[in-house]
Structures are given as C-alpha cells and as structure tokens.
Amino acid sequence: VVAGGCEISTIAGRVAGFRRILDTVQAMHGEEASAQHWFRRLVERWCFRCSDCKIVVSDATCEDWHRRVGLLREECTTVFNGMRPPDYSGFDRRTYRAQFCPDPDNTTLIGIVARLHPMKGHLVLLDAFAALLNRQRSGNALNVSRSAFHSSRILLLIAGEGPERGRIEKRVSELGIGDCVRMLGHRSDASHLAASLDLH
C-alpha cells in the first residue's frame, strides 16, 4: 500500500514485480509552481498507471485526479476518512466560545481546523469571508434561514499550523479583516473547537 500522487512507490513496486499494487489517494494535486512542471505531471501519470487499485478518501479527490491525470471513477474505491465520535459530555459550549469573543451569544463563529497548506484553501476562505463581511457591513441581508449574519458579530477562527501561515496573515492584512480573524495555531482540542462553531 502506498500513498498516491507524485510518488514513485507504485512505479518501484511495478518494476520490482509485485503482483498487486494498492494505491491510497488522500489528497488533491499540488498547487505549487513545481507541481506544474511537465516531468512531475508525467511521473504522476505513471504512478497511477502502475497501481491495480486506487482507494480515494472522497469523490472530490477522485474528480480532481481525473482532471489532472485522467483517473477513472471505475478504477477507484471511495473509503472516507474515519474518526471516533467525540465525547462532548461535560462540554460547556457557551463558556468555550467565550474565549474567542466577549459576547458568545451574539457572535457567529465560522472556522476551519486544518493544516495551513495551499491544498486546504485558506486563501479562498479568506476572500469569501471578506465578501461576507462586506455584505453584512453594507446592510445587504444574506439569504439564510435565520438572520444571524445580519444581526451579530462574525468571527473567523483559523486553527492549525503550516507553511502557509505567512501568506494567510498577509492576506488577512490586505483584506483589512484582522479585527474579525483569529489565528489560533495548533490546537489539541480540535473536536471541541469544531463543536463550538456555527459554520465549519
């Protein structure tokens, strides 16, 4: 079993004569400049062609690699990432939320808990969040089932660490939304943080 993408494990397995090669594809293709090089694209195609079975963690992953290297849906089996259901016994959501805002009952918390990496889409989230704030500040009511976004303060919580931190902080500054964004860094209480959010 090997991790899919631009890795030569499947190629090495095929050259070594392994009878069956199972490939697990756990991420979208890279967005960095080096990922666009023709040789890397060629290696990616070889990687997938050398495996007999591909396990993807989501339908979106399969679609992404289909566009990238022509991976076919019928070649893939989807096995979603699993997790143990969190234990929320004794979890005081309101008190937990108060650490991020002085008025937890009148604040809409939007958040992401993920490694700070280009494939996670933090910059896209920031642009969308800025647009949401602009609509709220201009008085344009949003079409939501309750008027939470129209009447309350909105905060964006970004939990995680990674190589994209500098770019994320720069984009927050460029968009002028620093008063509504909290960079939380690595969290050991990710399940409680997720449970405290209104939109995850």
Image: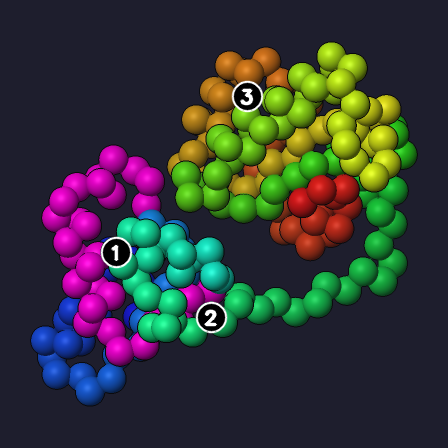
Q: Amino acid at mark 1?
A: Val
Whole-angstrom CA distance, mark 3 to mark 1, is 34 Å
Query: Residues in magenta?
Result: 30-57
Q: Say which element carries label 1.
A: helix
Which quarter shows the C terminus?
top right
Asked if the residue at tag 1 contacts the one at tag 3, i.e. Cβ–Cβ closer than 8 Å, the answer is no
Residue 2: % across, % down: 30, 70
Q: Secondary structure at mark 2?
A: strand
> Residue 171, relative to residue 200: is it above or below?
above
Q: Is residue 179 magenta?
A: no
Assess disc 3: are there few (<14), some (14-19) or many (≥20) residues with their C-alpha within 10 Å of its C-alpha.
Answer: many
Whether residues under marks 3 and 2 lie with C-beta atoms below 8 angstroms apart, the answer is: no
Q: Nearer the viewer, residue 91 or 1?
A: 1
From the image, tell me which residue sits under label 3: 172
Disc 1 target residue: 69
Looking at the picture, the colour scheme in use is: rainbow
Crowding near the residue tagged with mark 1, few <14, some 14–19, many ≥20 C-alpha atoms within 10 Å: some
Q: Is residue 77 left or right of residue 45?
A: right
Kind of residue at disc 3: Val
The secondary element bearing badge 3 is classed as helix
Q: In terms of sequence position, does the residue under pointer 1 or pointer 2 come before the other?
A: 1
- Percent from the top left, x then y, of residue 16? 11, 79
Q: Is residue 68 above or below residue 127?
A: below
- The image shows residue 193, relative to residue 136, as above or below, that is below
Locate residue 78, reporting x and y percent.
47, 70
Mark 3 or 1, closer to the camera: 1
In 3D space, how far apart are the residues under numbered discs 3 and 2 (Cα atoms)? 35 Å
Q: Quadrant of residue 3?
A: bottom left
In which quadrant is the N terminus drawn?
Answer: bottom left
Q: Residue at x 81, y 60 (%)?
A: 88
Residue underneath mark 2: 78
Q: What's the CA distance linking mark 1 and mark 2? A: 18 Å
